[in-house]
Amino acid sequence: MSDAVVGSLTTTTMSQFTSHSPPPLRHPVPTHPAYIPEPPPTPSSPQGYQRFSSSPGPAPQYQTHHVPAYTSPFQHSQPPPPPHLQHQQQPQHPPPIPQPDFAAWGMNDATAQIGMQLGQSAVAAGQEYVQRNFGTIFPSTTLKHHFNVSNSYVIHKIKLILFPWLQKPAAWRRKVQRSESGQSAEWASPRDDINSPDLYIPLMAIVTYILLCALHAGLQKQFHTKVLGESASRAIVVVILDFAFVKLGCYFLNVQGSSQVVDLVAYGGYKFVGVIFALLPSFLPRAPILNTILFIYAFLANAFFLLRSLRSVILPDPAVQLVSNPNPTSTATLTSAARRRRIIFLFLEAISQVLYMAVLVRI
């Protein structure tokens, strides 16, 4: 009896386990990409170069992705396009330069274009006005010639201005060279001739003089912005008066073929080198005697320098004048009275420097 019960229980339990068996295992099915690009066949020889039976076809074009310099970091992480679309994309040209957003400034494109055209017209009109009124007095070619200097020239020129008696009389003649076309002669540039006048040293000397005046006023605790204007006005007035005196003298003495306006302005601006030299002791306490001595020395040096330099303008050398001017009025045609008057005028110009320099050193 018991064996029959145990057998029935065992049969019932096995039937329950058999009815709840686990599901069958499912293996993943491998997937393949839809398209795999194959490289173009490139037959090569053992020597390492390609050999074609006919003319080679066009080289495959590969799309390059340009990443702008200023983009969000999310744009860099975007996935590339699908492989089957890469060969369909055409090469793109670099993007054009973006135009300024005038709308952000409160005006539309039409207004901005009109404003730009008006600005260009105003600049062109200003350049034309300057060239028409001042181009004949200060031509650009002349200004370039007078600013053609070197470091060696500046050092030796300042030495010549402060110590002019160290140079021999025969060395004061200006050099003449052929022009670029080779058809005429012209004065050598300051870079090639130490006796050639320049505008670099006078301009820098005037600026230095203005700064020294401001520094002196600051040390005296009397600095004001008007000091810069007063010193600049004083310097400009002195240069204009000196230029007018020389120009009028050349006119009344009938000095033909006199030097250019720029040359006379340059000669008149060299006095500021001596003025700066005479102003240096004024920064020392209780040095009136030294100020007087240096002022007298600076005046004599500048006067002697002008006597030697302006001689080529007032009393030009006939040999040099024949080379530089095809139809000159040489000093050989001057009478003794006319020559004497020119020499007197030259000495008056040299002596008048004491008045100009005395006005400049009173700061």
Image: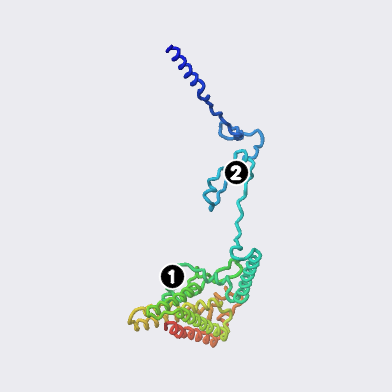
Q: Regarding mark 2 in the picture, which secondary structure is present there?
A: loop
Dots 2 and 1: beta carbons under 8 Å? no
Residue 85, image quadrant: top right
Mark 1 neighbour class, 10 Å CA radius: few under 14, some 14 to 19, many 20 or more: few
Q: Which amino acid does label 2 sit on?
A: Gln
Viewer-side residue, 321 vs 91: 91
Viewer-side residue, 294 vs 177: 294
Q: What residue type is labelled 1?
A: Ile
Residue 137: % across, % down: 58, 76
Where does label 1 land, which residue?
155
- Identity of the residue furthest to the left in this view: 286
> Is 57 situated above or below 173?
above
Q: How far apart are marks 2 and 1 (CA)?
A: 62 Å
Q: Residue 63 carries which label?
A: 2
Left or right, 96 with respect to 311, comes to right
Viewer-side residue, 238 vs 67: 67
> Is 177 situated above or below 314?
above
**Residue located at (45% from left, 67% from top):** 151
Left or right, 350 with respect to 334, comes to left
**Residue located at (51% from left, 68% from top):** 148
